[in-house]
Image (cartoon, helix red, strand yellow):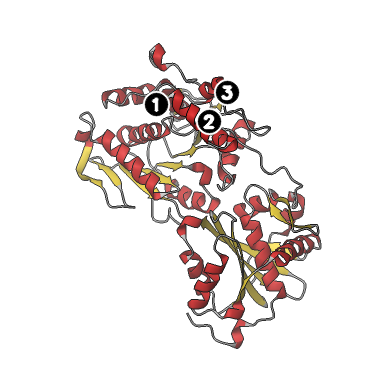
Amino acid sequence: MTKSLPSSYATGNQRPTDYVVPEFVENDCLDAIELMDRAGTPLMDWQAFLLECWLGYGEDGKWTSKSAGNETPRQNGKTLLIIARAAVEMLFYGGSVLYTSQLQKTSTETFKEARRLFESKALRKFLAPNGIGTALGRERITLKSGATMKFLARTSNGGDGQHGSLLIFDEAQALDHAAQESFLFAISACRTDRGPQVIYNGTPPKESDYGLVYEKIRNDALSGKSKSTAWTEWSAGCGGKVPDPHDRKLWHRVNPSLGILIAEETVESESENTEPERFAHQRLGWWSVKSTGEKLIPAKLWEPFTAEHPTEYERLAAGVRISADGAVVAVSFAMKLDSEKCHVEFIAQNPGTMGFRWVEDLIKRNASNIAIVEIDGKGGAEELERRLINNGLSKKAVNVIGTSECINSASMLMNMLTDGQLTHLKDDALDDSAESSVKRKIGSAGGFGFGGERPEIIESAALAVFGAMTTKRDPKRKAVVF
């Protein structure tokens, strides 16, 4: 496929520890390797191998890997790989690239690297006049052909109004369903010869990451459930005991750029100064299994109770769950249908770095109908309560719950589900959160709440249901002014 690297470079393992690639008839990989060589940025062997996994096409000329996921530990050179794939899309097919990351600073750094490539002696002739846009949050590269690459930070509606042929989800371990769905629609009208492609690129999810989307891509590919997804990973495995942080052979097996971009003494220092589990995630590509507790909501209990949005209801309540570390904020609404029945809908989830303005806007748009806002979370519940009240919401319409109410909200949701008294709008994010939830002990009297990989969505739903079914407040009695 490509020339062998000098022996001094062959330190890290140049092939994935696990991978699956849909069969292809032809491949554009060699042209991509030559392009990067001419631009003065030659690829390492493992990077070239990944491009081969991604750039295969069938007899119809379309990508056989409609989606591709990659997991490689940090600082191994994933960004150059992504930029190479983007350059291929723009220069070979005239396509447009949407690069997205969880944080704006990541998008800005990637833009800087891509800019250096396109301003190289070999490629700058392809740039359009004023083809480099540097405004923060609107960074872009435009070619004379009209091909573009935009660098965006993700939001739940960030894909609205965008379009392209190649969609890149960087930092995919933090990608949530709302952002995924918003951006996927941006490439549905792709017109390039090879068709659209989606790349998911990242590291194993940490405790604070929303990892359900990324994990599903991985699981569906490796299990054979997906026939059109390529998956590659350099990993110390999934689950079990935390890998030995001092195992040097393991360092080399799961870090393809060890000895090239990463010095062994750097990894040695990391292993001595980092908590073993964090080191395993960041440097060893270890996929921990956190949801080992008792499952609370099996699919057979959850799936039968989907329903459309009700046209009439007695009470509307909002539930806001802020994760313990403040990394995630989720909002759900619940509608009391009668004295025994309720309907719940997941509204939105965003990273804590976005602050509370979007939550305030949601509540503001529905303030005249919301009877109560139930809030749970050490990461800023009181702050959100203060802001809502300062914006005009009645003090009686906002409640920061305590331990007993948290326990009661989980119990109420479970009891209503079991009794067939709770319906929910069909939503992948809500479904995943509910069906992956496990029992989390709360307090000293045998109480429980929702735990698991990412329980905030189902927790917000439980809060909303609790509020709708217990509040006596009628927002129509007194005008609420923002």
Query: Which is more N-terminal, label 1 or label 3?
Result: 3
Residue 247, label in figure: 3
Of tags 2 and 1, the one toward the viewer is 2
Q: Quadrant of residue 319?
A: bottom right
Front residue of 356 and 135: 356
Position of residue 146 in the picture relative to residue 440 (left or right) = left
Q: Tag 1, which secondary structure?
A: loop
Q: Position of residue 379 (x, y in %)?
A: 56, 60
Disc 1 target residue: 261
For label 2, count other residues whose C-alpha is less than 10 Å away and answer few (under 14), some (14-19) or many (20+): some
| Residue 33 quadrant | top left
Answer with the quarter of the image where residue 142 lies: top left
Between 445 and 316, which is closer to the camera in this rendering? Answer: 445
The residue lying toward the viewer, choosing from 194 and 185, is: 185
Q: Residues within 10 Å of mark 3 (few under 14, many from 20)?
A: few
Closer mark to the observer between disc 3 and disc 1: 3
Q: CA distance from mark 3 to mark 1?
A: 19 Å
Amino acid residing under circle 2: Ser
- The mark nearer the N terminus, 2 or 3, is 3
461 relative to 479, above or below: above
* Horizontal arrangement in the rendering, residue 300 relative to residue 206 (left or right): right
> Is residue 211 depicted above or below 481 in this figure?
above
SS assignment at label 3: loop
Q: Amino acid at mark 3?
A: Asp
> Residue placed at 46% from the left, 58% from the top?
354
In this figure, which residue is indicated by the disc labeled 2?
271
Q: Position of residue 322 (x, y in %)?
A: 58, 60
Q: Residue 234: x and y, percent? A: 53, 28
Query: In percent of the image, x 62 and y 50: which residue is there?
Result: 454
Tally the numbered discs. Answer: 3
